[in-house]
Image: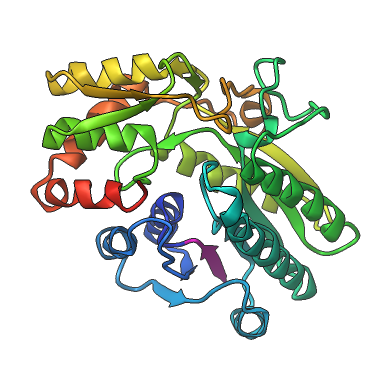
Amino acid sequence: MTIIVTGAAGFVGSHLVKNLAEQGETVIGLDNFNDYYSPELKRMRVSCLTPKNVEIIDIDLTDRKKLSSLIAKLKPITIYHLAAQAGVRLGLESNNQYVQSNLVGFSNILELSVMNDVGNFVYASSSSVYGNSLKTPYSESDTSLAPISFYGASKLSNEILASALVRGSKTNARGLRYFTVYGPWGRPDMAYFRIAEALTNDNQFHLFGSGDVVRDFTYIDDIIYSTIHLAAELNSRDKKGFSDVVNIGGGKPSSMKQLISAFETISRRSLKINQLPHVAKDVNQTFASLELQNQLINFVPTVSLEEGAKRVFQWANDSSVASKLTTWTKSVD
């Protein structure tokens, strides 16, 4: 049985492909290697994380004809759809990137999944759908969602589309609301990555705002474990067009100041900080309720922020990585 992973050269996607393949699954990865951040980093992920027996196909999900032919040929039992235009800080003139990737690409692969009777469609949503909600911890049952970024709005649109399109079909869908994923081989636009780079190469770290914003940091290993087991739980349900969303968070929100402190303690170095104004599209806090995740798969995250920071810093200081970090971070400046 074949499994498709889109965004296979991305941060979560590459780790997911690795884990699924190591479990003996037949995995096909899809990615278009776009230049939102360094394509070199994406290709290094594939080279370092992807087993040699996994095929990675270069394809843009907005190419409906090519995508349709591929899905019909592969007949996957499950599609993990992780490909998306990430980040909340693109300017108004760049919003079309969200439209093409997160709306057109999403609707293409979702519709084709339903048309080809793909049993399970598991897709990446985001904590950004909660906006600046004051109801903490954030619960999947909250219906008063108001994203404050185009990215967050596009992810909420994904959830609405999934629920509508799988209804009455043979496809079950589950949206995974990821909360601030971090770890080795991560995204260079993320704060933890830029902190690790600055400490490794003695550069400045650009801190947006006071450092009091709070994030529910979630380590990549916990993300992958939850993703795979939530997909398995979804597969155990009757194929009746079921759809839901599930939070995947760290469960212990920390401030940006605490993140910086964790890295400074691990590295035994002081971070050179260049403080900049707060970005309006950045939410003030994220805090996941993990009740549903625990109920479905009996799991809560196990990797602490301190342990996660240690693993990231060790990776960043590897000789094959350290010399490239600055170039990768500059690709999203």
Q: Look at the image and tell me in which quarter the N terminus lies.
A: bottom right
Indicate the quadrant where residue 129 lies: top right
Seen in the picture, residue 326 relative to 7 is either above or below; the reply is above
Q: Nearest the camera: 58 or 95? A: 95
- Residue 153 magenta-drawn? no
Seen in the picture, residue 124 relative to 221 is either above or below; the reply is below
Q: Nearest the camera: 11 or 63? A: 63
Seen in the picture, residue 193 relative to 30 is either above or below; the reply is above
Inspect this view and state whether residue 236 appears: no
How many marks overall? 0
Query: Residue 213: x and y, percent?
Result: 49, 18
Query: Residue 291: x and y, percent?
Result: 66, 22
Inspect this view and state whether residue 110 appears: yes
Q: Nearest the camera: 186 or 218? A: 186
- Asked whether, in this view, residue 114 is left or right of residue 220, the answer is right
Q: Looking at the image, which residue sits at the far right?
A: 168
Q: Which residues are magenta?
A: 1-7
Colouring chosen for the image of the structure: rainbow
Query: Residue 218: x and y, percent?
Result: 45, 31
- Asked whether, in this view, residue 46 is left or right of residue 138, the answer is left
**Residue under the point 43% across and 16% down:** 255
- Asked whether, in this view, residue 306 is left or right of residue 88, the answer is left
**Residue under the point 56% across and 20% down:** 285
Q: Looking at the image, which residue sits at the far left?
A: 319
**Residue under the point 34% across and 64% down:** 39
Prevailing secondary structure class for the magenta stretch in the rendered image: strand
Seen in the picture, residue 181 relative to 238 is either above or below; the reply is above
Query: Residue 69: x and y, percent?
Result: 64, 86
Indicate the quadrant where residue 298 lies: top right
- Residue 6 magenta-drawn? yes
**Residue under the point 39% across and 52% down:** 15
Q: Nearest the camera: 139 or 269? A: 269
